[in-house]
Image: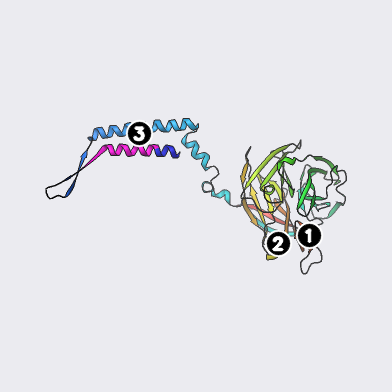
């Protein structure tokens, strides 16, 4: 486009100079006088302008043929990811109102389906009814694994099967990452999917099922390159399908959930010691895209006390956002280490937010 505009500008400048001729001379008093002479009469001048316009059109067509796109297509392609062309895309899609909270047994993740709730601890799984009465708890969830694991992160549920990102996690480092599927009734392991070590993912903090595209998405709490991508697997086969680069990535991703065409992510990006809130982010991934733009969706300044945000889910039956939040424990390298003043244990709560479209 720059070459095209420069060429047209030079042609236009040459034409204008051809239309006017300027001569300089001296009068009897030695003063410089300027005489302006028309090089062409009006008819010739108009003809030249028409000819030049045809030449510009020809040059423009030549440039379009060279890059295979029309000027309109170029503009549309360039504008497709420009925030000024769609400022509404940078705003939250929902308004959230806190309606209540409940203490739960588990500090990692939450999911909902069919009037039931499931909560994951680092080493436990629990099932609740719609009134948050505990139905069942599995305190030995790692039975049946071929590779050693000791940590469960945020979870999701699809057709009464729990999807879990399991790993061996210690002092901020994860290994033996795998997608594990549990029975929603017994909370027992059913099968696992192989993890693609070449993906660059170094840890798994959350997992989400996208039933619309039959995909499983994973996110990483570990920063740098690992935390700047979302990792996609086939829901039915477990095959690794690739990763998507987060543009404006949040820091310290903790959970991920799919709802109504968007992926939502929680980030532990507030400093609890300074009473800074954590946040919810949103993105939409188009088919075959290698990147996606991240938008701030909600600031959680209304929880009981600032601490560590964890997993999230959307209760489709009630149209609510469920958010797991921990308070009381000091977190160092992703692991509890002592307590804040006034606490002798960590408290894990699920906060419920009603949602309305903006």
First to last magenta residue range: 7-23
The answer to whether residue 225 is left or right of residue 86 is: right
Disc 2 to disc 3, C-alpha distance: 66 Å
Q: Position of residue 268 (x, y in %)?
A: 70, 56
Callouts 2 and 3 close, C-beta under 8 Å: no
In primary-sequence order, the first of circles 2 and 3 is: 3
**Closer-to-camera residue (103/221):** 221
Q: Secondary structure at mark 3?
A: helix
Q: Which residue is mark 3?
A: 53
Callouts 3 and 1 close, C-beta under 8 Å: no
57 to 187, vertically: above or below? above
Mark closer to the observer (2, 1) = 1
Q: Quadrant of residue 287?
A: top right
Kindly report the secondary structure that dominates the magenta region of the rendered protein: helix
The answer to whether residue 315 is left or right of residue 35 is: right
Quadrant containing the N terminus in the rendered view? top left
Q: Secondary structure at mark 1?
A: strand
132 to 66, vertically: above or below? below
Q: Position of residue 205 (x, y in %)?
A: 74, 50
In primary-sequence order, the first of circles 3 and 1 is: 3
Q: Residue at x 71, y 59 (%)?
A: 99
User: Does residue 10 belong to the magenta stretch?
Assistant: yes
Disc 2 to disc 1, C-alpha distance: 19 Å
Disc number for residue 95? none
Q: Which residue is mark 2?
A: 303
The answer to whether residue 261 is left or right of residue 102 is: left
Q: Residue at x 29, y 39 (%)?
A: 16
Q: Which residue is mark 1?
A: 336
Q: Position of residue 50 (x, y in %)?
A: 32, 32
Q: Secondary structure at mark 2?
A: loop
């Amino acid at each position: 486009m720059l070459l095209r505009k420069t060429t047209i500008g030079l042609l236009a400048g040459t034409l204008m100079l051809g239309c006017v001729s300027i001569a300089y001379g001296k009068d009897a008093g030695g003063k410089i006088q300027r005489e302006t002479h028309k090089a062409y009469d009006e008819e010739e001048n108009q003809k030249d302008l028409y000819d030049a316009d045809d030449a510009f059109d020809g040059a423009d067509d030549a440039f379009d043929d060279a890059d295979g796109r029309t000027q309109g297509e170029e503009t549309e392609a360039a504008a497709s990811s420009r925030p000024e062309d769609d400022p509404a895309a940078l705003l939250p899609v929902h308004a959230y109102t806190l309606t209540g909270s409940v203490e739960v047994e588990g500090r990692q993740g939450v999911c909902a389906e069919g009037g039931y709730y499931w909560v994951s601890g680092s080493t436990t799984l629990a099932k609740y009814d719609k009134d948050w009465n505990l139905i069942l708890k599995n305190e030995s969830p790692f039975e049946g694994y071929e590779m050693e694991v000791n940590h469960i992160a945020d979870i999701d549920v699809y057709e009464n099967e729990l999807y879990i990102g399991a790993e061996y996690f210690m002092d901020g480092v994860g290994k033996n990452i795998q997608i594990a599927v549990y029975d929603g009734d017994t909370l027992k392991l059913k099968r696992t999917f192989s993890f693609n070590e070449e993906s660059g993912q170094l840890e798994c903090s959350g997992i989400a099922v996208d039933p619309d595209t039959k995909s499983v998405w994973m996110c990483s709490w570990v920063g740098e390159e690992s935390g700047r991508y979302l990792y996609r697997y086939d829901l039915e086969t477990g095959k690794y399908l690739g990763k998507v680069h987060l543009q404006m990535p949040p820091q310290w991703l903790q959970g991920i959930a799919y709802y109504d065409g968007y992926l939502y992510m929680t980030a532990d990006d507030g400093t609890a010691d300074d009473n800074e809130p954590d946040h919810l982010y949103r993105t939409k991934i188009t088919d075959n895209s290698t990147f996606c733009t991240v938008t701030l969706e909600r600031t959680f300044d209304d929880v009981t006390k600032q601490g560590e945000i964890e997993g999230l889910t959307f209760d489709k039956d009630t149209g609510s956002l469920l958010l797991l939040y921990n308070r009381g424990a000091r977190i160092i390298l992703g692991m509890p280490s002592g307590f804040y003043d006034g606490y002798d244990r960590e408290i894990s709560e699920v906060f419920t937010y009603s949602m309305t479209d903006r």
